[in-house]
Amino acid sequence: MQLAKPRDPAYFRAAMRLVRRLHAANVIHNDLAKETNWLVTPGGCPALVDFQLSMTLTRRGPLARALGHDDIRHLLKHKRSYLPERLTAREKRILATPSLLSRAWMASGKKIYLFVTRKIFRWRDREGAGDRQP
């Protein structure tokens, strides 16, 4: 995505359908915030990679709903980057309301994650972007 920079609203409609199909199959991706996990096929369609952090949940309980909400919210963040004028009022509300899990992660775990990855390993969290040196 960071190379193709999709500007076609059809890409984001198809990406939303893709995420909803995953969720209907009880699969939560958990890493859609990274542009490098979103591909644009030669035909302009979305595709996903890196299911390392994904999970399958057997029932659609509160955890699945919270994690699914964040998958959608992360997709909408990308749409906001490339097509901010095409965000609907509902999409703006979703963007404004991270899940409780997301808020807890941002307030606690992410600080540790950033310290370890950025300060100790000197990673920049852009896999495939070529900024990591051996």
Image (cartoon, rainbow, N blue to C red):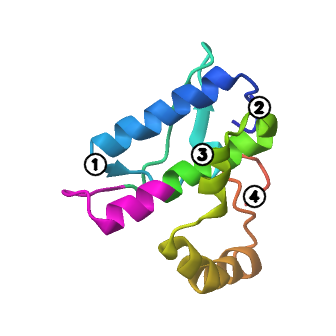
Report helix, strand or loop for mark 3: helix
Q: Residue at x 28, y 48 (%)?
A: 26
Task: State yes or no: discs 4 and 1 in contact (Cβ < 8 Å).
Answer: no
CA gap between label 3 and label 1 equals: 18 Å
Q: Residue at x 50, y 52 (%)?
A: 71
Give percent across and percent down for residue 47.
Answer: 52, 31
In the picture of the structure, the residue carrying the numbered disc 3 is 75
In the picture of the structure, the residue carrying the numbered disc 1 is 26
**First to last magenta residue range:** 55-69
Report helix, strand or loop for mark 1: loop
Taking the magenta stretch, the answer to whether it contains residue 63 is: yes
Marked residue nearer the N-terminal end (4 or 1): 1
The three-letter code of the residue at mark 4 reads Arg
Task: State yes or no: discs 3 and 1 in contact (Cβ < 8 Å).
Answer: no
Task: State yes or no: discs 3 and 4 in contact (Cβ < 8 Å).
Answer: no
CA gap between label 4 and label 1 equals: 34 Å
Give percent across and percent down for residue 88.
Answer: 67, 39
